[in-house]
Image: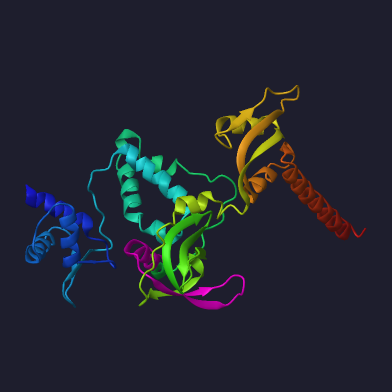
């Protein structure tokens, strides 16, 4: 029985090609799971298992390296209806969020889910894969294209805590620059994936859009960890929200009935209150929100259905933006009509 459990654990540790794991690595990982086995036994186990599973052995160097055939579709564990539907929804959602190379990594699971549903014709589930959609909130741009070697290299560097050498297209200077990066985290924001890393010998965290990395290779420099860094705190401090400052602010706004209905079901914050509607159905919204431009842009997206009362700076900024837009469209209208 122990041998069977070891076989199952080993199968879960072997990646799909072109990734691989050496027998020495497999031995270390198995030991972490409580299995004590020598290298020769692991090699014999893998040779035996390869008679039943599509394993690939790279014997070009020692220790031997193992991977699954990239087209292998696993059927373990067995699929169920709820899991299959969840995977179909997840695929729809992730296609608008993650780069295609990342979604492709899950294609075997998505394929199995659709195949499972297609096989349930007698139960009426066959068309469910074509009857579910995940719709993004707002206009979603297509994910920025990332070269497969870049995504794989970033993934490996993050997990193995390795420094990397990159050729990066600078957006500000519009030129390719070379950096030694020490990866500390990864964030997907809207349609762009960002590597969070320290650069060369500096300690501050910088953001690098993965689609602007043109070349990537392991670095000979030793990886420099950032012990105090936390992605959660980094994001919470407003790094991706274009903060005006690090304080929360009290938002007070008049909102029309449709916006009030939306916020009653999906609040803008945990500290939110909605007043009793006035005779026209308008409601006073009071909420504690981050003092960032993202929240201001979200408010402006409602147009005339939201009137910001507080903070005064927000009301002024939105009013100025609306005035500038009105002037721009008025000027364009005059040019179009020849006035």
| 150 left or right of 26 in image | right
Which quadrant is the C terminus positioned in? Answer: bottom right
Residue at x 37% of width, y 45% of height: 87
In front of the other: 30 or 114: 30
In this orientation, does residue 96 appear? Answer: no
| 118 left or right of 255 in image | left
| 198 left or right of 221 in image | right
Q: How many marks?
A: 0
- Pinpoint residue 327: horizontal percent, then vertical percent: 84, 53
- Pinpoint residue 317: horizontal percent, then vertical percent: 75, 49
In front of the other: 168 or 147: 168
In this orientation, does residue 111 appear? Answer: yes
Question: What colour scheme governs how the chains and residues are painted in the rendered image of this protein?
Answer: rainbow
- Residue 81 among magenta residues: no
Question: Is 238 drawn above or below residue 22 in the view shown?
Answer: above
- Pinpoint residue 12: horizontal percent, then vertical percent: 22, 54
| 168 left or right of 272 in image | left
- Residue 176 among magenta residues: yes
- In the displayed orientation, state which residue is furthest to the right: 339
- Pinpoint residue 306: horizontal percent, then vertical percent: 71, 37
Residue at x 28% of width, y 61% of height: 71
Question: Is 199 drawn above or below residue 84 in the view shown?
Answer: below
Task: Choose top left, top right, bottom left or bottom right for residue 65.
Answer: bottom left
Question: Is 77 drawn above or below residue 327 in the view shown?
Answer: above
In front of the other: 48 or 179: 179
Residue at x 16% of width, y 58% of height: 53
In front of the other: 268 or 52: 268
Q: In this picture, which residue range is highlighted in magenta? A: 151-179
Question: Is 75 drawn above or below residue 23 in the view shown?
Answer: above
């Amino acid at each position: 029985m122990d041998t069977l459990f070891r076989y199952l654990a080993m199968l879960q540790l072997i990646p799909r090609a072109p990734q691989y794991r050496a027998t020495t690595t497999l031995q270390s990982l198995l030991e972490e799971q409580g299995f004590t086995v020598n290298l020769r036994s692991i090699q014999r186990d893998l040779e035996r298992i390869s008679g039943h599973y599509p394993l690939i052995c790279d014997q070009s160097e020692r220790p031997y390296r193992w991977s699954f055939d990239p087209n292998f579709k696993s059927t373990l564990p067995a699929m169920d209806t709820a899991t299959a539907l969840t995977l179909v929804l997840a695929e729809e959602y992730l296609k608008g969020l993650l780069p295609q190379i990342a979604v492709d990594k899950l294609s075997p699971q998505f394929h199995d889910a659709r195949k499972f549903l297609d096989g349930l014709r007698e139960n009426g589930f066959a068309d469910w894969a074509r009857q579910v959609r995940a719709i993004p909130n707002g206009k979603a741009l297509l994910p920025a294209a990332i070269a497969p070697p870049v995504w794989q290299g970033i993934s490996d560097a993050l997990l193995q805590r390795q420094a990397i050498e990159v050729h990066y297209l600078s957006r500000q200077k519009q030129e390719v620059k070379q950096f030694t990066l020490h990866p500390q985290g990864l964030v997907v924001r809207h349609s762009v994936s960002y590597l969070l890393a320290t650069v060369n010998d500096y300690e501050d965290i910088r953001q690098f859009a993965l689609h602007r990395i043109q070349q990537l290779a392991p670095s000979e420099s030793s990886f420099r960890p950032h012990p105090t860094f936390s992605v959660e705190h980094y994001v919470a401090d407003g790094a991706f929200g274009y903060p005006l400052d690090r304080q929360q602010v009290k938002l007070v706004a008049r909102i029309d009935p449709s916006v009030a209905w939306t916020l009653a079901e999906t609040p803008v914050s945990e500290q939110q209150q909605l007043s009793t509607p006035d005779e026209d159905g308008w409601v006073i919204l009071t909420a504690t929100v981050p003092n960032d431009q993202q929240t201001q842009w979200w408010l402006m997206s409602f147009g005339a259905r939201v009137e910001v009362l507080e903070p005064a700076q927000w009301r002024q900024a939105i009013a100025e933006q609306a005035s500038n837009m009105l002037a721009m469209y008025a000027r364009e209208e005059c040019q179009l009509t020849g006035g």
